[in-house]
Amino acid sequence: MADALRIVGGTVYDPINGIDGDIRDICIENGKIVDTVKEDAKQLDASGMVVMPGGVDMHCHIAGSKVNLARKFQPEDHRGDVHPSTRYTRSGTGGVVPSTFATGYRYATLGYTTAMEAAIPPLGARHVVEELNDTPIIDKGFYILLGNNVFLYQLLEQKRYDDLRQAVAWWLNASKAYTIKLVNPGSDEAWKGKKNQNVKDIDEKIHFFDITPREVIKALIDVANDLGLPHPAHIHCNNLGHSGNYRTTLETMKTADGRRVHITHIQFHSYGGEVGKNPTSAAKAISDYINTHPNISADVGQVMFGKSTIMTGDAPLAWMLRNVTGGHTKWINADTECESGCGILPFSYQQHIYTHALQWAVGLELFLLADDPWRMVLSTDHPNGGSFMNYPRLIRLLMDYEFRKEQAALANQKAIDSTGLLDLKREYTMQEIAIITRAGPARLLGLADKGHLGVGADADITIYDDKADQETMFSAARYVIKDGHLFISDHEFCADHEGRILHVAPQYDAAIEGAIKPFFSDYYTIQFNNYPVDEHYIHNHQIIPTSASA
Ligand SMILES: [Zn+2]
């Protein structure tokens, strides 16, 4: 049980509770924010510093088989960036895809206390849980890939909507996941079944089935809403990276028909232009739609110049990128025994390349055109658009127009000039940064106890030195508190901590197992009874209630 603590005199940014840079005390006891503590409670002097809720990353890739493959085939990345142990913390390796321990510690150093792994085939859930158990300090959860699930396709084809809902609820329970993820829905059958092909339009028929990607998208958006999941269906749209793909993105958003949906790394889905030609920016069209449709939320998936690693359930995309790099890069396709596609390759975004500079500018445009920062939150789709360690620099790009202009001047001018980036003089305020990095993602995830500092919230708190250079300021928190425990003090680790796995447990009719079992016997490489992840396997966890079961 954590001691009581009073954080005194800090400048507090707590957007959910309408606190915008006010100087006030924050009291914590037993891991939660409380109204007040006893006079003789310990004090932490935060005067002259900025106090915020712990950061929440709603879309990153930090655990599971694809992350491990990416680690394995970039040994040079780890050799060059050893993460040493301290008296309190374990060692690890860094690079763009850090090891489990380093991942937890590095997020914490930036002031993040929650991160969600965004793409897991349910068959790999047990491995993910093992790795997340070994990712210290932060709370975490994961989304399961269901947009290419053959059993669900069969139910949909037979119009068995109620069974579909029961089956999805069963899958979420069996894997201990947080929500439903769709990646390039319909593409696996074209990729695996028709040999290296892809879906081009969400209204074409899925190979082998009498359904379309749009029907899959619609059905899973409905299921997530009907089950009352705290976070809706989380969608990586079709045609990622292709010129002209903003039309697919708009059609996907329209398919929600007013129901809640989250479109992820939307930067990669906001390109104009013609197929096969250079992309242009369609950030304005995408922003206009989102600004006027409150049922839609998105994270940006900002591209940052430098090294990244592509790791995706979108196998045809990884194949395309492997080919644009001339086929000289390492590349893995690992989607056998996997209820998804999968492709991985090391990548590097370079300022002088037209497409990369355009992607960088489109991401920034999406941030700067967002009327409602609560629904356009920060991500780099770590490590796809770049490591999460780039967040401090990204924050400075949003807060500092002159810096943005300087950086734009170093990039491909044909690309920059083709966008509206330099006309956007908006500078994010500290409050808006608090929204896109913690309050907004927490709200979109339906995490009522996170992203704010009101009474009853988890005592996940970050205190930054108030510096004029925001990149320096957000690179290393002065103090970080998780569940009421102080574990970074004066920029140094002073303790270790084990975070929780956050998952949902929607109710379902057990009769659905009678339909799923024979499918396992016929197609799976694992027995039905060995598939579900038992509760005892996730030793430290928290069930986030669905609105149907709350
Ligand atoms: Zn992703």
Image: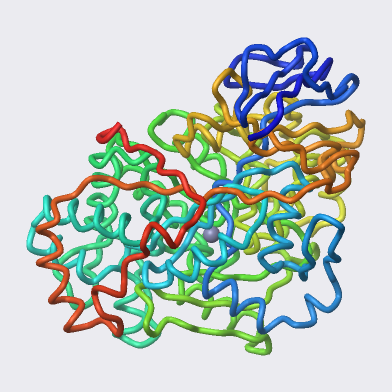
Instruction: Find residue 154 and report its image quarter.
Output: bottom left
Compared with 189, 390 (above or below) is above
Q: Position of residue 40 (x, y in %)?
A: 80, 14
Nearer to me, 337 or 238: 337
Instruction: Give the total number of marks visible in the rendering.
Output: 0
Q: In the depicted view, which residue is nearer to us: 91 or 450? A: 91
Residue at (37, 46) in percent of width and height: 504
Q: Is residue 293 left or right of residue 366?
A: left
Q: Does any portion of residue 404 appear in the rendered image? A: no
The spot of residue 130 in percent (x, y) is: 53, 67
Question: Residue 300: x percent and y percent?
Answer: 58, 47
347 relative to 319 in the view: left or right:
right
Tell me the quadrant of the picture where the C terminus can be found.
Answer: top left
Q: Is residue 141 above or below residue 151?
A: above
Say if 465 sits above or below 155 in the image: above
In the foreground, 430 or 246: 430
